[in-house]
Amino acid sequence: MNRRTIVFLGVLVVVLGLGLVPQVIKKDNIINLAILVFVYVMMAVSWNIIGGIAGQTNLGHAAFFGLGFLVARMLWAEHRWPLFLSLLLGALVPVGFAMLIGIPAFKLKGAYFAIGTLAMAQILFITVRNLFPMMSFLPGDELAVYSLRPRYYLAFGSTLFTIAAAVWISQSRWGLGMRALREEAVAAESLGVNVLGHKLLAFGLSAFFGGLAGGVFAYYAAGYYYFFPFAPTWTFDAVMATYIGGTGTIIGPILGAVFYVVVKEILALRLVEVHLIVFGVLFVLIVLFLPGGLVQVWDKIRHLRAPSSRRQAPEPVPCSPDTVPYSGEN
């Protein structure tokens, strides 16, 4: 049995196991935690497309999440549009917004791009807070039949779709172009890579799945302020989860989001007053000692388990073409 088959069977077992969670576990707090994990996985994976694969640090990811929440919530809960149409439009509106701001934003380089996206998100946050200061509640008929099970399966299915799309993107020629501009944009452009086009593509895909996460959260929340999903906390949570797991990888944001949500919730219950300080110290330690994220742990384990002869193999001695190896004969 080769490695690919083992990975496929492992993923299949995990997917089937997660699909049975609402049937086996009846505690609402566990289902709520699982839904929150799914939302954070979608946020981390979507941010990783622009921040990890394409190498563009976007600190305004909450704008995409908030727009997805706002559009989906208003269409579905306020105007009673079909749920899936509301979710689709909630994911497409952030794409349009990303394209609108992408061209001028990508004229900024390095830290200036990060600061520009953060400023854009903050402007949107303040604008929505002034326009929609009220809290949104589900309609009475929806609230009367509210159940966590359909919310769980919607979040679960959307997460699988997001991960599958991220895998396909990373292995496509567009994904290779994004990785090339992440390593060296000038060299990538000299090889024929459309730098601005690939940046906009990564930005749009990141916005789509970030908006989809916001739409899923809009369906899950029984009552929520319209402007809260635009808060910068959502951006920094996605960034921290991605860096904890490992940027630029597929499994890294998933591991990071699960670790981030579960550990943060445990610390919040056990260490109510100082849990943020403890988690901050833990995050700093992970970044310092595991700069590649949690995925680096597996590489370290494989290195330690490798035979000492493979770990300490002597390096070949370079020789010139004129050198004749000594054979022991005169």
Image: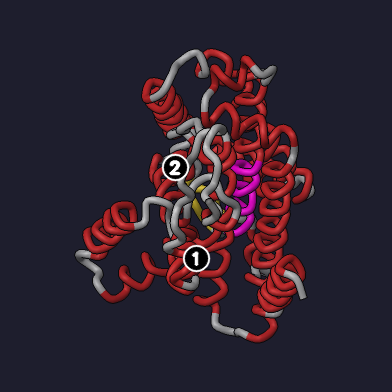
Quarter holding the N terminus? bottom right
Residue 151: percent from the left, percent from the top? 66, 64
Q: Which residue is mark 2?
A: 235
Position of residue 111 relative to residue 309, above or below, is: above
Give, as a three-letter code, the residue at label 1. Arg
Query: Do the residues under discs 2 and 1 have CB atoms within 8 angstroms?
Result: no
Q: Where's residue 135, x and y in %?
A: 48, 47
Crowd around label 2: few <14 · some 14–19 · many ≥20 (10 Å): many
Per the image, label 1 sits on a secondary structure element best described as helix
For the residue labelled by badge 2, is the local secondary structure a helix, a strand or a loop?
helix
Viewer-proximal residue, 178 or 190?
A: 190
Rendered residue at 43%/34% (across/down): 59
Numbered range of the magenta stretch: 209-220
The rendered magenta stretch, by its main secondary structure, is classed as helix
Q: Which residue is mark 1?
A: 310
Q: Quick check: 116 above or below 265? A: above
Residue 144 percent across, percent down from the top left: 65, 68
Residue 158 image-quadrant placement: bottom right
Give the spatial CA distance, label 2 vs label 1.
42 Å
Q: Amino acid at mark 2?
A: Thr
The relative height of residue 191 versus residue 71 in the rendered view (above or below) is above
